[in-house]
Amino acid sequence: MNIELSDITRKFGRNTAVDRVTLEAGPGVLGLLGPNGAGKTSLLRMLATILPPSSGQLTLLGRDPRNPADRREIRRRLGYLPQNLGYYPSFTVVEFVEYFALLKEMPPHLVTKAVAAAVEQVDLGSKAKAKLRTLSGGMLRRVGIAQAIVNEPELLLFDEPTAGLDPEQRVAFRALMRDFGQTATVVVSTHLVEDVGAACSEVALMSNGKIVFRGTPAELTVRGETGQGVGDAPLERGYSAILAAARA
Amino acid sequence: MTMTPPDGVDLDRVWTNVAAEVWRRHPGRLERTATRFLRSPGLARALLTTPSLLLPWLIATTVFLAVGALAQASAGQPLVWLIAPAVAAVGVAYAYGPGIDPAWELSCSCAVSYRMVLLTRAVAVFAVNAALGLAASAATVGTTASAHAAQLTFAWLIPMTAICAMALAVAVATRSANTGAAAGVAAWIIVVLGWSAASSAPGAAGVSLTAAVTDPSLYLPYLAVAACCAVIVGYATRPQRGTQ
């Protein structure tokens, strides 16, 4: 298992963002769904080793991130796209991706080809030498995706990755996630249920810091048929039925 | 006419290799040297990109020089001298921290410790300002401005550069930014208190905690410490035979 969480809790003052979450995940694409404030981003930041849990046991890639040496090794094998990724406007696409490849301690002789491959994978080859300040929001998002995948991570974390992408790019990105899910654990936090239906092999639904559903997209759809969900698509009905039940 | 690739040729792979060569960025001599000294291409790149991150650079430099000027104006206040380096370091940390650095969160998820990056950037801010201070005092030689610039450079910029370089040397050698920062703070306290004790010895003229920065006889030692730290880091990180 690449991710093993046991009774993980994260508090900010009196507010409990993540409440005793237990979760295991191996290779595949896990969709993390939930309304705003459900705790998805806090959970993802703990998986990215940025935020330590207040309590509970967290093991990533078989290592304990509380140990500095283990944490460093995890980070070498991690890809992370934050929800609000900032950019250095004066960097070019290649410089930005290369900078983070180096900070991830990739072997220097592999960096150049890995950067080129990552830039091509997100279809930014024609903008490789363009300054980030000249790119559109969707292109910048793809730069963020490129830096996340440049080290071919075993644990890949995306927070709202498709925000700002046009439909064609979203389809391409889902294919990319499925490809990575063959060998790596991909966790994608989103509020777009269509992304989950198209790309995820499993879904975890969060509400008020807890995981209130874990299953396949098909199982989520079934819950919409039997519950009191509302929405235009079957997955949306499943999503709202589970949330309604959790709130009740 | 349509051209087809020979069997067994992966055009995507070929194109990626071509693109890698076309986009390849050749590190300059300075970056290669920094990579060797810091034992990390990531840290070296972070060091060299420090000035190009303009807003953090301006904030850090302004705070650094303002604290230096305040310390100069408070020559009789030992507490100011003891606290001033910490305030300057906090200013640099703030400038390159979560509020200003747009990619801070991403940097925190990387294998190269963000604290190490911060320490490296502090050295860059201090060293570049020290060089600018030297240049300013040389350019205005013979004037009152030159005297002020020289005083600020030798009594503030160079000591701070030396202390920070020492902290970075310890951090690189021990692979711990916390250890390096602790060593830097400890070194500064020892220098200030030690030189104060020495200057208050029988027969010595004056008793002042600020002797560590007002005594011109220490200027050269500060430069020597900075140079020694560079040599130590260079020696500690020299390429081993058979590894390259």
Image (spheres, grey):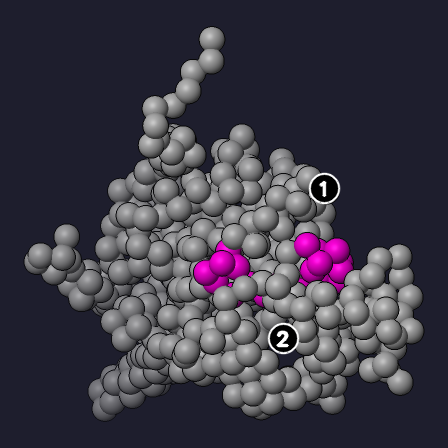
Q: In which quarter of the image is residue A106?
A: bottom left
Query: As displayed, is residue B39 above or below residue B141?
Result: below
C-alpha separation, residue under disc 1 versus residue under disc 2: 27 Å
What x and y, as percent, mark residue B39? 26, 60
- Judged from the image, the secondary structure of the residue bearing numbered disc 2 is helix
- Seen at 83% across and 76% down, the residue is A243
Chain containing mark 2: A
> Is A247 positioned to the left or the right of B55 in the image?
right
Q: Where is residue A202 in the image (x, y as percent from the top left)?
A: 63, 68
Q: Camera-side residue: A24 or A133? A: A24
| Residue situated in front as seen by the camera: B89 or B155 | B89
Q: Alpha-carbon neighbours of circle 2 within 10 Å: few (<14), some, or many (≥20)?
A: many
Q: Residue at x 47, y 69 (%)?
A: B89
In reply to whether residue A187 is colored magenta, the answer given is yes
N-terminal-most mark, 1 or 2: 2
Q: Name the residue under label 1.
A: A166
Q: Which residues are the magenta region?
A: A180-198
State the residue lying farthest toward the top: B1
Q: Is residue B59 left or right of residue B10?
A: right
Residue beneath disc 2: A43
Query: Residue B115 — which label?
Result: none
For residue A233, which quarter of the picture?
bottom right
